[in-house]
Structure formats: structure tokens, C-alpha cells
């Protein structure tokens, strides 16, 4: 079955005024349009455009009523609220006009254990200080749709941060220079240990006045400097003045994706999306541990438990070429796979499916045929594809994204 679906973009304050409409060829609303959710997540389940066709108004409702047709045994776990089987992934169009919070997500094992502990504690699931809203992990990938997509992603080698801080110290004087130099000296030593100590000091353990002086000094040092790290400091300071996450950004990989490049963010990777529009595909979960650049609750001890402090290179995800014009991004988790279809000729291409799928067109138009049915999609159209279609014969021109398992 091919069931057309849709949704309304979420209007988070950091959303872009134009990114969503530019990506999909739609009319901008004039308000921030941050995320378009395509899936069955209870926070914003996709609408079924023809409810009578399946006897349900939303994708979540249909899955709960008929898991055999919609999931065919794919194991996405059980929703802790409804008790219904879950679609394991959530597909989003994300359009960032400003920085999102620094955050990380737990492993599957930790999510299960901590969720049970918080349930047993009696802490309400909607409490501001609740960390684990469900027992699931939340790895994610980001495919850049815009010409560039900016992000902070994972810890880099402390020596690179020290070198930058030395230059920053030379750009200011007096107490500001000393504050920067003193922080730089704390980054000498075993990388994991010094990064852990730096995060704890910035977010919790450090004297708040000393941290404030350091943040102010770093912002001052970044003035008039056009390197990406300095530009990022200034932009973060404009959005979140005085936030320790401004300094924390200097410890992270600063990434600028070009259109078509992909990041994969596994459990424990601290990250923040800064600007740009992309396809975000993730395991369906609400478990977020924040680390700055937000007015929301930050549980520093739990964040530190989750974080992977080993310095790592930028975690680009390379595709497999499944067929000419079909590139598949397959991370090391069973929850999701992203296929990007950009046909190179008029000949149809085959896209295999191993479970339920969601498709959306960002350019052009496509015809899709499966084992049981067929459909046509134009730009901005999205569709839920049941597992019974088995594989897709796709023809057309443009760009079609297919999220599946």
C-alpha cells in the first residue's frame, strides 16, 4: 500500500523563515518553520491525507490499529504510553535559522536502564527534569539539503583547542587574556580526562564568576576574526549570551557540510546544529541530554555519563551505491536506513525494502511501483509504504528520499 501522508512544520524559535519552503518548493508561512515530522512519533504524528482509506486519521493511530499491515513484524519496540508497536524511525526536514542546543543521546542499553529507574522513582514523564521519556536510543543522521549545513559534532583533539586558545589570548589583554590562558592550561594531559574535566568545570563545578569571565573573554577575542570557530562564537553569543556552551564549542569539531554530505551521530556524540536545511533521520525517541545553548534543564552528571569523550574525526557517513543513481546510507544500527534516489537515466531503478518506508520528494517527480500497488509523487509529496510492497521500481527525475529499516 502507498498511503499519502503530511504534516505541519513545527514552529520552534530557531527555525528558518525560508529554509523549509526553499527545500520543498512550498509557500513560506512568514513564521519560523523548524521541523517537518514524517512518522508516527506521538509528539507530531503524520496525518493520513485520506483517512477513509485506512480507517485512521494519523499514522500512529493506523499502526496501533493494524500493526501487521503497517509494520509486518518489524521490531520498533512498544510505546510506553499506548502499549502499541512502534515505527522505529522518524524522518524530518530540519531547517535551522539559528543554533540548536548542545546535546547528546544515550545508548540503547542506558536508555532502557535509566527509563526504568526514572519510572520507579515516580518522576512524571513530562517533568522538566525528566531525562528519559522512553526506553529507546536516538542515533541520527543528517543529509545536507542546503548549499551548506553547519554543525558542531564530537570532541576534537584538545591540542587543537589549546592552539586556538593561545591565539585567542593574544587578541585580548589583562584578566581576559589570563582567563583564556588558564583554561587552555587545563586542557593539557590525557584527552579523555581533560575533556571530561573541562565539561564538568564549564557546566557545573567551576566558579560561576570565573566561567562568566572566561565566556566574556572568548567572545571578546572572537571579534573581528573570520575563522569559523570565531564566527561560531559570535553567533552563539548573539543567540545565547553568557552561555558556557560558547566556550564548549571550541572543544568540538566545527563542521560545514556541502549539499549531499552526511553526518552520522551515534550514542554519546555531543553535537549542535547551527544553520542550514537537511534531511534528518533518527531512531524515534525523545531522550535528549543537553549540554548548553538552551534555557532548558541540563543534568550535568547524567550528560557526563552519556558522553563519549574520546576525540574523534568528523563522523561523515559514506553511501553504498545500490544501483546507478541510488545511494544508500546505512549506519551501524538496525533502526533506519536512508536511500537517496537521483536517477541518471529514464530507465527505472530498483530500491529494495526490508520493512515499512516513508518517501518524500524534494525535487522533480517520480513514479513508484511495488509488489501490490503504485503511486506518483511530485515535489513536497510524502508517502507511507507498507512492507508488503517488498521492493520499489522507481522512475522519474529529481531527488527522492526513502527512509526504511
Image (cartoon, rainbow, N blue to C red):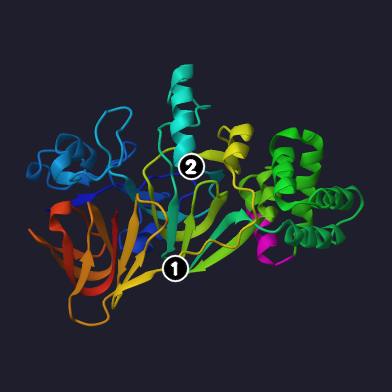
Q: Is residue 353 magenta?
A: no
Nearer the observer, 302 or 35:
302
The numbered dot on residue 318 is 1
Nearer the observer, 139 or 166:
139
60 left or right of 271 in image? left
52 up-or-down from 143: above or below: above
Q: Residue 294, can we see it?
A: no
Which residue does the numbered mark 2 point to in the structure image?
Answer: 107
Residue 199 image position (x, y, % from top left): 69, 43
Residue 236 image position (x, y, % from top left): 63, 51
Q: Is residue 232 magenta?
A: yes
Segment tinted magenta in the rendering? 225-235
Residue 185 image position (x, y, % from top left): 84, 51
Give yes or no for contact between labels 2 and 1 (Cβ–Cβ under 8 Å): no
Residue 345 image position (x, y, % from top left): 23, 82
Mark 1, residues whose alpha carbon is within 10 Å: few (<14), some, or many (≥20)?
A: some
**Residue at the location (79% across, 46% down)?**
214
Amino acid at each position: 500500500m502507498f498511503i499519502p501522508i503530511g504534516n505541519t512544520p513545527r514552529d520552534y524559535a530557531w527555525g528558518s523563515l525560508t529554509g523549509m519552503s526553499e527545500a520543498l518548493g512550498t509557500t513560506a508561512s512568514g513564521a519560523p518553520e523548524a521541523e517537518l515530522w514524517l512518522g508516527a512519533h506521538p509528539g507530531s504524528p503524520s496525518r493520513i491525507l485520506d483517512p477513509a482509506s485506512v480507517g485512521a486519521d494519523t499514522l500512529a493511530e493506523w499502526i496501533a490499529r493494524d500493526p501487521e499491515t503497517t509494520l509486518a513484524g518489524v521490531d520498533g519496540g512498544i510505546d510506553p504510553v499506548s502499549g502499541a508497536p512502534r515505527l522505529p524511525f522518524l524522518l524530518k526536514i530540519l531547517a535551522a535559522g539559528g543554533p540548536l542546543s548542545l546535546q547528546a543521546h544515550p545508548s540503547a542499553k542506558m536508555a532502557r536502564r535509566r527509563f526504568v529507574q526514572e519510572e520507579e522513582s515516580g518522576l512524571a514523564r513530562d517533568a522538566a527534569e525528566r531525562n528519559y521519556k522512553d526506553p529507546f536510543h536516538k542515533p541520527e543522521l543528517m543529509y545536507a539539503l542546503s548549499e551548506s549545513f553547519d554543525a558542531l559534532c564530537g570532541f576534537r583533539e584538545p591540542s587543537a583547542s589549546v592552539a586556538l586558545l593561545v591565539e585567542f589570548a593574544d587578541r585580548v589583554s589583562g584578566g581576559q587574556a589570563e582567563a583564556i590562558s588558564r583554561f587552555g592550561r587545563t586542557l593539557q594531559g590525557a584527552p579523555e580526562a581533560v575533556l571530561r574535566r573541562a565539561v564538568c568545570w564549564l557546566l557545573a563545578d567551576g566558579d560561576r564568576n570565573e566561567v562568566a569571565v572566561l565566556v566574556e573573554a572568548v567572545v571578546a577575542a572572537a571579534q573581528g576574526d573570520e575563522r569559523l570557530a570565531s564566527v561560531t562564537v559570535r553567533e552563539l553569543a548573539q543567540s545565547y549570551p553568557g552561555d558556557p556552551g560558547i566556550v564548549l564549542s571550541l572543544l568540538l569539531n566545527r563542521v560545514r557540510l556541502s549539499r549531499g554530505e552526511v553526518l552520522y551521530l551515534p550514542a554519546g556524540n555531543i553535537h549542535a546544529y547551527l544553520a542550514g536545511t537537511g534531511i534528518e533521520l533518527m531512531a524515534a525517541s525523545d531522550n535528549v541530554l543537553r549540554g548548553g545553548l538552551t534555557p532548558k534543564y541540563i543534568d550535568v552528571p547524567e550528560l557526563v555519563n552519556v558522553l563519549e569523550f574520546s576525540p574523534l574525526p568528523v563522523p561523515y557517513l559514506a553511501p553504498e551505491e545500490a544501483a546507478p543513481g541510488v545511494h544508500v546510507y546505512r549506519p551501524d544500527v538496525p533502526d533506519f536506513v536512508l536511500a537517496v534516489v537521483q536517477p541518471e537515466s529514464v530507465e527505472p531503478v530498483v530500491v529494495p525494502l526490508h520493512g515499512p518506508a516513508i518517501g518524500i520528494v524534494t525535487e522533480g517527480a517520480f513514479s513508484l511501483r511495488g509488489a501490490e500497488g503504485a503511486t506518483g509523487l511530485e515535489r513536497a509529496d510524502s508517502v507511507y509504504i507498507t512492507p508488503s510492497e517488498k521492493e520499489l521500481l522507481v522512475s522519474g527525475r529529481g531527488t527522492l528520499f526513502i527512509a526504511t529499516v
